[in-house]
Image (tube, rainbow, N blue to C red):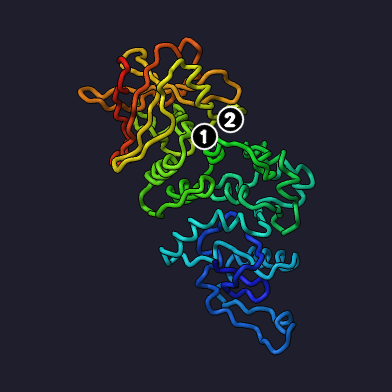
């Protein structure tokens, strides 16, 4: 891990030192201080133990003209005053021209924020006068809360301090837990670092509506939240988010990953599509109650089924899962998921459609995530589905009757 010295402004690789870390809204690439910009920083004299404190670093002319320099200096000054010799800043501590280093950094970033001594959130569009007038409104208007990468940067660090554009301190994550919950819909227990059980759908819902400069980063920025590591492939577009979901499914039997729905205005709102969500936006939930898992034994008892397998199995061709389902209206089938809204009594259901002449099924009516009633839970039959790797663009489901069950 490469760190920036807060006084010398040199990039170094010290071992096992406490460090601050910066979270911010990027400017244009040309305005940020980069790794390359700091490669030729002069090293101050080392004649005395305190000599270097009296020598201001000299930046190259091209760096002095960058808008991001003031932000970098402000972060370093804040860290230095707090007693930290080092800080990590993503704009300059990663050589983004090195694809191997960039991939390693993206896969490690959640851990780097988690392990930091303190995270400084710099809100370039919030002034101290607005904070003094109404701190909640001032924070809610900051574009920092709309960005994809800043989600993990809020959650991962234990200590988070917010600063206005003049580097005046606004407050901490712990102090503003209630306000931050209202802005982000993240549970206060999470913001306060308290243990709690979270479903996949709930974590995905935090990312709904957030934006990233590159499509792929909507997936890559979520890897740490799910403890996932995977290759970084810029250019794969929306496949990155489907690939993320497949990686999550390898280590989890959480069926809330299927509890998504598209809005009527969604550009990919086709009637029949794959089983996985196209983006985190599909997990957006208007209800204040998150989607939670149902205990398997309770689920089996509720559905009056005795041979419903729990979890997924993985093979070379994909992932396999068994879901209770029954014929619905027209050519649709109703599949019941082992999850519900936190305020609901019964599970959610999704609709599937069989492809003519085959045993394959597609998710149909993707705008519908149905809240089921007791009557919907009668006459269900467990069926085994396969989610195939070869169908990343439009994932299909292969359906087979489980042994000993009737159609």
- Which residue is depicted at the point 58% across and 54% down? 25
Q: Quadrant of residue 308?
A: top left
What residue occupies the far right of the structure in this picture?
132
Local SS, label 1:
helix
Q: Is residue 128 left or right of residue 18?
A: right
Q: Along the line of sight, which residue is nearer the eye, 15 or 157?
A: 15
Extreme-left residue of the structure: 357
Above or below, 358 relative to 276 = above
Q: CA distance from mark 1 to mark 2?
A: 8 Å
Quadrant of image for the N terminus: bottom right
Q: Give above or below for 338 relative to 101.
A: above
Quick check: 228 left or right of 162?
A: left
Q: Which mark is residue 290?
A: 2
Question: In the rendered structure, are the residues bearing label 1 and label 2 in contact, judged by CB atoms less than 8 Å apart?
Answer: yes
* Residue 140 visible, this orientation: no
Residue 174 lies, with reference to residue 361, above or below; the image says below
Where's residue 256, x and y in %? Answer: 49, 31
Where's residue 76, x and y in %? 67, 67
Residue at (60% x, 70% y) in the render: 15
Question: Label 2: how many residues lie within 10 Å, few (<14), some (14-19) or many (20+)?
Answer: many
User: Percent x, y for residue 231?
Assistant: 40, 54
Residue at x-position 41% and y-position 63%: 99
Name the disc covering residue 201, or none.
Answer: 1
Question: Is any part of residue 123 visible from this angle?
Answer: yes
Q: Residue at x 59, y 82 (%)?
A: 42
Q: Quadrant of residue 187?
A: top right
* In the depicted structure, whether residue 352 falls above or below residue 244: above
């Amino acid at each position: 891990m490469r760190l920036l010295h807060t006084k010398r402004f040199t990039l170094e690789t010290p071992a096992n030192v406490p460090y601050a870390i910066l979270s911010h809204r990027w400017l244009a690439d040309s305005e940020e201080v980069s790794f390359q910009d700091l490669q030729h920083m002069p090293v101050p004299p080392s004649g005395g133990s305190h000599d270097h404190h009296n020598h201001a670093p000299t930046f190259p002319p091209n760096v002095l003209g960058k808008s991001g320099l003031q932000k970098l200096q402000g972060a370093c000054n804040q860290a230095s005053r707090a007693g930290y010799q080092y800080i990590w800043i993503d704009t300059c501590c990663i050589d983004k021209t090195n694809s191997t280093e960039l991939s390693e950094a993206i896969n490690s970033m959640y851990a780097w924020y988690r392990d930091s001594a303190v995270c400084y959130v710099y809100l370039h569009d919030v002034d101290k006068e607005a904070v003094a007038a109404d701190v909640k409104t001032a924070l809610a208007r900051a574009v920092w809360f709309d960005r994809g990468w800043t989600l993990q940067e809020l959650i991962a660090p234990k200590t988070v301090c917010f600063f206005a554009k003049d580097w005046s301190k606004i407050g901490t994550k712990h102090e503003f837990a209630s306000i931050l919950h209202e802005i982000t819909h993240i549970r206060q227990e999470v913001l306060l670092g308290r243990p709690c059980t979270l479903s996949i759908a709930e974590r995905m819902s935090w990312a709904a509506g957030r934006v990233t400069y590159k499509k792929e980063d909507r997936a890559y920025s979520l890897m740490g939240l799910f403890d996932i590591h995977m290759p970084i492939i810029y250019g794969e577009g929306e496949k990155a988010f489907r690939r993320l979901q497949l990686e999550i499914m390898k280590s989890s039997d959480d069926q809330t990953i299927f509890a998504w729905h598209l809005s009527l205005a969604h550009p990919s709102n086709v009637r029949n599509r794959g089983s996985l969500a196209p983006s985190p936006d599909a997990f957006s939930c208007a209800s204040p109650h998150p989607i939670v898992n149902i205990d398997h034994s309770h689920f089996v008892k509720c559905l009056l089924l005795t041979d419903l397998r729990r979890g997924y199995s993985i093979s070379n061709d994909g992932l396999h899962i068994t879901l209770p389902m029954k014929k619905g209206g027209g050519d649709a089938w109703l599949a019941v998921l082992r999850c519900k809204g936190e305020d609901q009594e019964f599970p959610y259901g999704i609709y599937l459609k069989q492809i003519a002449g085959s045993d394959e099924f597609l998710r149909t009516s993707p705008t519908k995530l149905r809240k089921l009633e007791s009557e919907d839970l009668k006459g269900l039959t467990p069926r085994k589905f396969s989610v195939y790797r070869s169908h990343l663009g439009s994932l299909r489901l292969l359906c087979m009757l489980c042994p000993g069950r009737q159609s």
